[in-house]
Image (cartoon, rainbow, N blue to C red):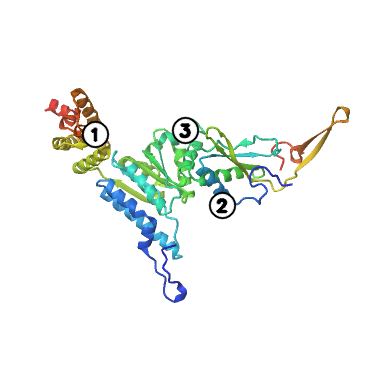
Amino acid sequence: MHAINESTPSSGEPPTFDLEAAFKGSRVGEVLEELDRELVGLAPVKARVRDICALLLIDTLRKQAGLSTDTPSLHMSFTGNPGTGKTTVALRMAEILHRLGYVRKGHLVAVTRDDLVGQYIGHTAPKTREVLKRAMGGVLFIDEAYYLYRPENERDYGQEAIEILLQEMENSRQDLVVVLAGYKDRMERFFQSNPGMSSRIAHHIDFPDYTDEELFEIAELMLKQMQYRLSDEAAAALREYIALRRSQPHFANARSVRNALDRARLRQASRLFERGATLTRDDLLTIDAADIRASRVFQNRESVS
Amino acid sequence: MRLTQGTFSFLPDLTDEQITAQIEYCLKQGWAVSIEYTDDPHPRNTYWEMFGIPMFDLRDAAGILKEINACRATFPRHYIKVNAFDATRGVESLRLSFIVQRPENEPGFGLVREEGPGRQVRYTVRSYATERPEGERY
């Protein structure tokens, strides 16, 4: 509303619309900047989020100009390996949609199969509806959505949950945005077997794996937030650790890095504890190479080679 | 005779937008909203039937309005009220309760006089509607 310039159609001039003012007014820029600053890498994801922002902003202006705008379908699917930032981006997305006025409250309700599917006949529908009611006015984030559909068991109640979800995704588009998340290949199979779900989701965003360099940057960011510092040797050790950890099973990108740092903190604490002498502020702050090199990842390599 | 129980009952019936605004206020206070219905609106009938369980942890009124509409569809000729429960320690009771649907035709209440011993008279009210069995009253 504040975006429309003073000129009115009666003055003979066509009205103009100030995109920049609308962008500033919505304060979406702050969230996008935060996204850029706090999330390392993920260039394709950031680009898609920007695209969606632009579309919504233009739609808002079109509405002001009296042009026809369908409420755009905002349901999304986030695919990618574990630890690639799907939940974090979903949180930011909720904030962005809230600022643009496409969801009223902007909270995120994260659920898995257990929260939606019941254990006996007649249990699923109320459970799913309950979750949907809680998510109204915000974003419903369904993690590992493909578990909802179990083709091997035809009496599985997951199908019922999917049907209710589909119905609500269609009927309460102005009240609710649904984000489905999970591994890429399994999500694709899920969409193949549920074409109704696929056609109702407008935005498919794929989260790429992080490179070693990006993971190291993430580690530095995490340490900064926890107020720790890596010594130079520790930094080198951590780079080595990341390269080694990637080739091992259950590698979960940023989550693996966070776990590694948590264990390094543990070892640092017990190292300082055993030393027992008076400690300087520096001692408390610094993680040493030894704290990282004690990891199982390094020991395995030595036993193998 | 128009039933006057609960908040806003002397005002014209609330529209859906007004109901939404009231529920938004309740949610902002952190109260849990529930829906109840009855076809026996005696003033002493405190406990109406619950339509679903009370809705905790909600952030937006849209979900509750959907539930109200579901209740209206199931019981088109009953009284329906919305309650907001405050769980704060020391309060633990209803903070707000208002009627969101009433039957088209409300016959009202009649005064019943009971003859007691020694020409004593006891009075009570009785809803004309409850002369018929449950479910056929309005």
Inspect this view and state whether residue A124 appears. yes
Marked residue chain, label 3: A
The image quadrant where one finds the C terminus of chain A is top left
Question: Can you identify the residue that label 1 sits on?
Answer: A261
Q: Is residue B127 left or right of residue A303?
A: right
Between label 3 and label 1, give the one nearer the viewer.
1
Find the distance from the CA under tag 2 to the CA under tag 1.
52 Å
Q: In which quarter of the image is residue B121?
A: top right
* Disc 3 and disc 1 on one polypeptide chain: yes
**Image spot of residue A103 (x, y percent):** 44, 50
Name which residue type carries label 1.
Answer: Leu
For label 2, the SS is helix
Mark found first going from the N terminus, 3 or 1? 3
Name which residue type carries label 3.
Answer: Gly
For label 1, the SS is helix
**Image spot of residue A131 (x, y percent):** 46, 39
Whether tag 3 and tag 1 are in contact, CB under 8 A, the answer is no
Using a 10 Å C-alpha cutoff, classify the residue at mark 1 as few (fewer than 14 neighbours), some (14 to 19) or many (20 or more).
many
Viewer-side residue, B101 vs A3: A3
Question: Can you identify the residue that label 3 sits on?
Answer: A118
Name which residue type carries label 2.
Answer: Glu
Inspect this view and state whether residue B82 appears. no
Between label 3 and label 2, give the one nearer the viewer.
2
Q: Quadrant of residue B51?
A: top right
Using a 10 Å C-alpha cutoff, classify the residue at mark 3 as few (fewer than 14 neighbours), some (14 to 19) or many (20 or more).
many
The residue drawn where x is 40% and y is 52% is A99
Please determine whether, in this image, residue A87 is positioned above or below residue A58: above
Q: Is residue A113 left or right of residue A39?
A: right
Between label 2 and label 1, give the one nearer the viewer.
1
* Disc 3 and disc 2 on one polypeptide chain: no
Question: Can you identify the residue that label 2 sits on?
Answer: B17
Please determine whether, in this image, residue A57 is positioned above or below residue B81: below
